[in-house]
Image (cartoon, helix red, strand yellow):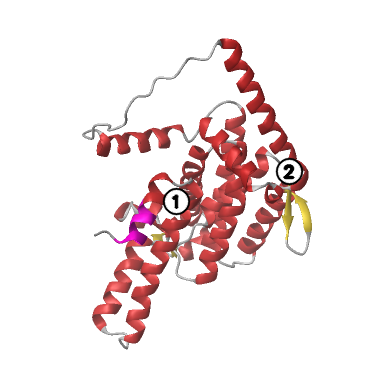
Amino acid sequence: MANPIIEDFKLKIRNGNPIARLIIINVVLFFIISLFRIITFLSGESGIFIIIEEFIKDNLSLSLSLGGLLLKPWTIITYMFTHFALMHIFWNMITLYWFGQLFISYTNSKKLIPLYLLGGITGALLTILLFTIVPPFQVFLGAPIIGASAGVTAIIIATATLIPNVNMNLMFIGPVKLIYVALFVVFIDVLNVASYDNIGGNISHLGGALMGYLYTMQYKKGIDLSKWINQFFDWTAGLFNSNKKSKMKVAYKRKFTDEEYNYNKKLEQENIDKILDKISKSGYESLSKNEKEKLFKASEKK
């Protein structure tokens, strides 16, 4: 009999919203890594456990050099799901949740994971490029990098570029326009690079920020940079479902007339516009559970 917890995780990853999928993958991997680290510690740092722990680190973290990337190309993806410190993953996931909800509300759910991946990849490539060509940075060549921050920063900047004047309620501060939140995030990363504090991490954040900005600017022009990633996901899903016959029964319903269809669409859009107006005035958290569900279902149809 299958473990119900594992089955629940599988169901949420397959059918849950993209924020839940990203958080579950990050958290599950964090717990697996933490378990090996605890076992290593309790074993008195026994040789075999040290070897296993180092193997996991080496094959999940990204070595910031062209040679490291070519040797282990998969790490440009795995690094953005890997965390070793509790507070590191906590702040990344809570920020992903806050801004991910807003981003989905104004676009649709299929764009979030591709943006997260594009932000992480761009952040890694920009960091490797600068470490390779800028002499003061070359001393850091080959340093490992981990964390979801570049992907999360891409989502922050993309959301702020899309809806700059929407307020976000910040603890101890109150409502602040998203554009100011985004500028503060970028400002802090620039300062940290200038002070040589976690240079690789902060440059990758700036790369993610650049991708977030470019993504939204192209989105406003009708160009979807996430399209090819979603096509790849659909193709991959098709490989696993190609041999499965649908067991669903077809139910035939009366067709709506053009007038009925247009009227229903108009009512639906008016409801969504009211919800978006409420977000603009009072923030996403002011919505009721029913309003959040309506907004999510509407985003799924886009």
Q: Position of residue 4 (x, y in %)?
A: 34, 60
Q: Which span of residues is magenta-colored?
A: 3-10
Q: Which residue is drawn at 58% across and 59% down?
A: 94
Q: In this view, does 243 lie to the left or right of 95?
A: left
Residue 106 place in picture, x, y as percent: 62, 37
Mark 2 Cα-neighbour bin, 10 Å: few <14, some 14–19, many ≥20: many
Q: Compare residues 246 and 122 and report the one nearer the observer.
A: 246
Label 2 residue SS: loop
265 relative to 173, above or below? above
> Is 5 within the magenta?
yes
Residue 21: image tag? 1
Residue at 55% x, 11% y: name it: 257
User: In this rendering, would 64 be left or right of 39?
Assistant: right
Residue pushed farthest left? 243
Side (left or right) of 242 relative to 104 = left
Mark 2, residue position: 166
Between the residue at mark 2 and the residue at mark 1, the CA separation in whole angstroms equals 26 Å
Give the amino acid at mark 1. Answer: Arg
- Regarding mark 1 in the picture, which secondary structure is present there? helix
Query: Which image quarter: residue 237?
Result: top left
Please report whichever mark, 2 or 1, sits nearer to the chain's N-terminal start: 1
Query: Residue sitting at 67 percent across and 61 percent down?
Result: 191
Image coordinates of residue 68 in percent, x first then y, are: 35, 57
Could you tell me residue 235's position as x and y percent? Answer: 32, 34
Q: Which class describes the residues within 10 Å of circle 1: few (<14), some (14-19), or many (20+)?
A: some
What is the three-letter code of the residue carrying label 2?
A: Val
In this rendering, does residue 129 appear at all?
no
Count of numbered marks: 2
Magenta region, mostly helix, strand or loop? Answer: helix
Vertical arrangement, residue 239 with respect to residue 38, above or below: above
The answer to whether residue 271 is magenta is no
